[in-house]
Image (spheres, rainbow, N blue to C red):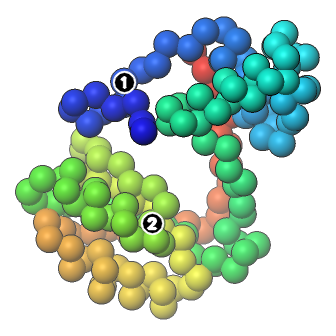
Amino acid sequence: MTNTARTGSPRPVNLDDVSKAIIEQLQADGRRSYADIGKAVGLSEAAVRQRVQRLTESGVMQIVAVTDPMQLGFTRQAMIGIRASGDTRELAAALAEIPEIDYVVLTAGSFDLLAEVVCENDDELISLLNTRIRNLPGVRSTETFVYLKLQKQFYNWGTR
């Protein structure tokens, strides 16, 4: 269950300094042991384990392996700007169901939505665009920004 208000927008969660420190420890090294984190933040291993479980169950954080798509055979990444008609939330939900799309955001500006895709090659990208994305109800137009090189990808922005 995620921490979502009736509007569908995430509500900010008030975290104490210890929970923030645990998150920052995991952002630095997601494989860090609960015992090591406990030493750094002044809690027992069991207490850290409980807090991490609460943080993940509430949707505050995820612990995942971040991979380099190129090294795994996904040679084409792109950001697709989408101009839409109708309810963009419904279109965002439909886009989020497509496995090749790993990131969907509703935006303000010249695009209504942005969707990041990871494909094995250009043929897969063309097929995805023509048969799955552009055929969705509400898609008026798309503009594709092909990634030439992924220069930086970090998720360690910390906490407030």
x and y percentages locating residue 16 in the rendered image: 61, 9
Q: Quadrant of the N terminus?
A: top left
Q: Quadrant of the C terminus?
A: top right
x and y percentages locating residue 86 in the rendered image: 8, 57
In this rendering, the label closer to the viewer, 2 or 1: 1
Q: Check contact, mark 2 vs mark 1: CB within 8 A.
A: no
Q: Residues within 10 Å of mark 2 (few under 14, many from 20)?
A: many
Whether residue 145 is visible, yes or no, is no
Numbered tag placed on residue 116 in the rendering: none
104 over 144 or under it: above or below: above
113 over 57 or under it: above or below: below
SS state under label 2? strand
Residue 104 horizontal side relative to residue 9, left or right: right
Q: Quadrant of residue 84?
A: bottom left
109 over 54 or under it: above or below: below
Q: Residue at x 46, y 19 (%)?
A: 13
Find disc 2 in the rendering and name its residue. 101
Whether residue 38 is visible, yes or no, is yes
Find disc 1 in the rendering and name its residue. 11
Q: Earlier in the sequence, mark 2 or mark 1?
A: 1
Give the residue type that dot 1 points to. Answer: Arg
76 over 114 or under it: above or below: below
Q: Residue at x 39, y 88 (%)?
A: 127
Residue 82 horizontal side relative to residue 40, left or right: left
Q: Residues within 10 Å of mark 1 (few under 14, many from 20)?
A: few
Q: Quadrant of residue 96?
A: bottom left
Give the residue type that dot 2 points to. Answer: Ile
* Of the pair 125 and 26, the residue shown nearer to us: 26
